[in-house]
Image: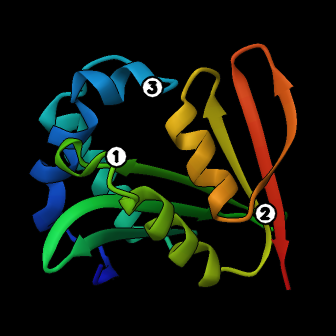
Amino acid sequence: MSLLLRPAAMADAKRLLDWRNDPHTREASFQSDVIRFDDHCGWLERVLANDSYQLWIAELDGQPVGHVRACTSDVETTLSWMVAPSARGKGVGKQMVKMAVKLLSGKIRAEVKSGNAGSARIAEFAGLVLVNAERDVLVYEMTNE
């Protein structure tokens, strides 16, 4: 598997929105509403312009298969990710998140919706450890030196 992470760009907007609005993705997300294109483009512009964010597109053999987002504060970096519907169940999510974790330092955190077993497995494969499970949120953390 030849997987790489590249920085996202506005040209990725439609693809990212299609992945985000996929019914399975919405079901596994904390925010399950359908997102409108204009709202999504505004969000993406803000993320791409904000130095606190890193947004990577994962490509497998040149084809986009998912994304990883890292939001860094003074305290920690919070990760989130999404695997393209066509790439689910192939180990892509595990590899792309593990690659992203290797690019980061300090405290890393991810919140996974309870019942989202796929994302829980991805977090654990990437080295994050379950530290808290409250109501509908599983909190994973690790520290990279």
Q: Secondary structure at mark 3?
A: helix
Q: Secondary structure at mark 2?
A: loop
Do the CB atoms of the residues marked 1 and 2 lie less than 8 Å apart?
no
Up/down of 143 relative to 85, above or below: below
Sort mark 1 into few (<14), some (14-19) or many (20+) by Cα contacts within 10 Å: few
| Tag of residue 76 | 2
Find disc 3 in the rendering and name its residue.
28
Q: Residue at x 30, y 68 (%)?
A: 57
Cα gap from disc 3 to disc 2, whole angstroms: 24 Å
Nearer to us: label 3 or label 2:
3
Q: Is residue 56 left or right of residue 125?
A: left
User: Label 3 sits on what residue type?
Assistant: Ala
Q: Secondary structure at mark 1?
A: loop
Nearer to us: label 1 or label 2:
1
Between disc 3 and disc 2, whose residue precedes?
A: 3
Location of residue 102 in the rendering, given as x and y in whole percent from the top left corner: 63, 82
Q: Residue at x 30, y 79 (%)?
A: 1
Location of residue 42 in the rendering, given as x and y in whole percent from the top left corner: 26, 47
Task: Please tell me which residue lies in front, 67 or 126.
Answer: 126
User: Label 2 sits on what residue type?
Assistant: Glu
User: Label 1 sits on what residue type?
Assistant: Gly
Cα gap from disc 1 to disc 3, whole angstroms: 15 Å
| Tag of residue 89 | 1
